[in-house]
Amino acid sequence: MKWQSLALLGALIFPVSGSAQIVNGDFSEDGLIGWQVEQPQQSAPGVLGSAEPTHGWIINEIDHMAVFLVSATLTPAETGCIWQEFSCGEEGAEGMCEIKFDYRLLYDSGLETAARVLVLIDGAKLFSSGDTQDDLEFDTISFPIPPGDHLIKLCLEVDTGISAWRVNFDNVSATYMENVATEAATWSSIKRIHR
């Protein structure tokens, strides 16, 4: 059977660079430049390797990634976040914005209370690692959002109890992907192009 009239329809999506996207998403620019910090009320700046469980966002200078250390207490569960506003394409434009990031969740010490990584866009939870009491090794996550101006929030949430958890975030990006319509073509015309 010959496929002389196979029509190929659809749309291609191409990344397009734009302005005012996520700043310092690889955390290589002098700490948390571009990011705002939102910590539990009893937070204090943390230091990796401290003998005491600490609270706070720091930068792992060797690996260039954001690190949040949190020690939950017997008071309500704690959440620590970093956030920033960014633009990704123009609002109402055809296409989409791809959010992408790497994360790792590590249990440090104490009772095994549950913890989770959350990512919010404009206040809506678009990613949750789910409750865990175990380490989660590095994973790359991506999801689409509409183009326009947004606020991204990267969070670690730890349940009530006495335990210490650490999250690492790295390679946070927002890339506008433009839809490019393709024209219908027959299989014969495509074969001619590639001969």
Image (tube, grey):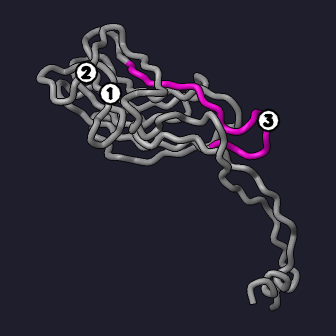
Picture quadrant where residue 150 is located: top right
* 188 magenta-colored: no
Which residue, given by chain and number where applicable, does mark 1 sit on? Answer: 68
- Mark 2: secondary structure: loop
Question: Counting residues from the N terminus, which is met first, the one under dot 3 or under dot 1?
Answer: 1
- Tell me what residue is drawn at x 45 percent, y 43 percent: 171
Helix, strand or loop at disc 3? loop
- Across and down, in percent, residue 66 comes to 36, 33
Residue at 26% over, 41% down: 62
Q: Amino acid at mark 1?
A: Phe
Q: Would you say 131 lies left or right of 143 here?
A: left
Query: Is disc 2 surrounded by few (<14), some (14 to 19) or many (20+) residues within 10 Å?
Result: some
Q: Nearer the viewer, residue 130 or 93?
A: 93
* Residue under label 2: 46
Dot 1 or dot 2, earlier in sequence? 2
Identified by mark 2, the residue type is Gly
Q: Residue at x 82, y 58 (%)?
A: 181
Label 3 sits on residue: 92
Look at the image and give the residue range highlighted in magenta: 79-97
Q: Nearer the viewer, residue 140 or 5?
A: 140
Left/right of residue 75 with respect to residue 20 in the rendered view? left
For label 3, the crowd category at 10 Å Cα-Cα, with few meaning under 14, some 14 to 19 and many 20 or more, is: few
State the image quarter where residue 50 is shown.
top left
Alpha carbon separation for disc pair 3 and 2? 41 Å
Q: How far is disc 1 from disc 2 in space, using C-alphas?
A: 8 Å
User: What x and y, as percent, mark residue 25?
Assistant: 47, 38
How many angstroms separate mark 3 from mark 1 (CA)?
A: 35 Å
Kind of residue at disc 3: Gly
**Which quadrant of the structure image shows residue 52?**
top left
